[in-house]
Amino acid sequence: MTTTGRRRVLGQHFLRDASAARAIADLARLTRDDLCVEIGPGEGALTFLLSDRAGRLLALEVDEALIAELRPRLRSLSHVEVRCADARRFDYSTLPALKPSPEGRVVVVGNLPYSVSKPILERLVESRGAISEMVLTLQKEVAERIAAGPGSKRYGSLSVLTQLYCDVRLAATIPPGAFRPPPKVDSAVVHLRVLAAPRVRVRDEGGFRRVVKAAFGQRRKTLANALAGGLHSSVATARQRLAAVGIEPARRAETLSLEEFSRLSEVFS
């Protein structure tokens, strides 16, 4: 596959608006004590702004042609490294050891390709023990799903599994013209701060994730039917377990709070 073909498959749109880039860099509030990890530096619109503020910058780029263009421009900056890596598989647990100061933070900043934004976000949340904050540019619809609360049509497993571990704030909307090539939809910047502990009690994280995924797996079905199908149990069993934790079996997943999902996971895990 050619470089252009790969970029098209990934859904890459390079940031070209200088004011938008500055606003994103400002959100990160970087200091010389901090390690900044930039996901997808692309053509470097954000990279130089981040390098001016962070004590150390690690840029992760999967496109070797872009790396070849970017590295010579950054050669004089000894605190900047461009590494060929896939953000969906990168070992983020290695990051705290790279901080320029023990008091510093690990801040992830990225303009995520549309087609892989969700798996990258899930990987980052899984690696939350090594990360302090994230400033991520995504398709606006995805950003709204991350920030949505119970009762919203956009509220889903992505909302629950992110908000369990992070404070989430929609920080800005970016129009298509700020990118090259312009996408067909708006983008948004989401600011996530990793919590010191999960927002609600979760005894079995894997079980919690399975219950949440099953509950939202068939959104049009009642909670009892969705859980029965997703967790391979009978509807009668699902109804009994829901009743045991005080949740009406006829409700839909999008009406449940994080605390209710916590109770639900206790009886289904």
Image (tube, rainbow, N blue to C red):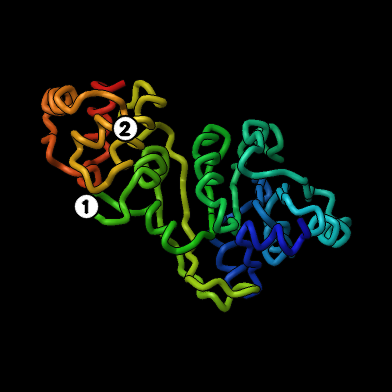
Q: Residue at x 70, y 57 (%)?
A: 6
Res 17 → quadrant:
bottom right
The residue closer to the viewer here, 99 or 1, is 1
Regarding mark 1 in the picture, which secondary structure is present there? loop
The residue closer to the viewer here, 232 or 189, is 232
The N terminus lies in which quarter of the figure? bottom right
Regarding mark 2 in the picture, which secondary structure is present there? helix
The local crowd at label 1, few if under 14, some if 14 to 19, many if 20 or more residues have their Cα within 10 Å, is some
User: Looking at the picture, how far across and down is residue 41, in whole percent?
Assistant: 70, 58
The C terminus lies in which quarter of the figure? top left
Determine whether, in the image, residue 114 is placed left or right of residue 40: left
- Residue for badge 2: 230
Q: Residue at x 37, y 53 (%)?
A: 147
Amino acid type indicated by mark 1: Gly
Q: Residue at x 25, y 32 (%)?
A: 227
Amino acid type indicated by mark 2: Gly
Answer with mark 2 or mark 1, whichever residue precedes in sequence. Answer: 1
9 to 87, vertically: above or below: below
243 to 121, vertically: above or below: above
The residue closer to the viewer here, 227 or 89, is 227
Determine whether, in the image, residue 230 is placed left or right of residue 235: right
User: Looking at the picture, how far across and down is residue 251, in whole percent?
Assistant: 15, 42
Of circles 2 and 1, which is in front?
2
User: Looking at the picture, how far across and down is residue 260, in whole percent?
Assistant: 22, 34
- Residue for badge 1: 151
Q: CA distance from mark 2 to mark 1?
A: 21 Å
Q: Residue at x 58, y 56 (%)?
A: 112
Furthest residue in direction bottom, as rendered: 177
User: Looking at the picture, how far across and down is residue 215, in whole percent?
Assistant: 28, 37
The local crowd at label 2, few if under 14, some if 14 to 19, many if 20 or more residues have their Cα within 10 Å, is some
Determine whether, in the image, residue 74 is placed left or right of residue 187: right
Res 199 → quadrant:
top left
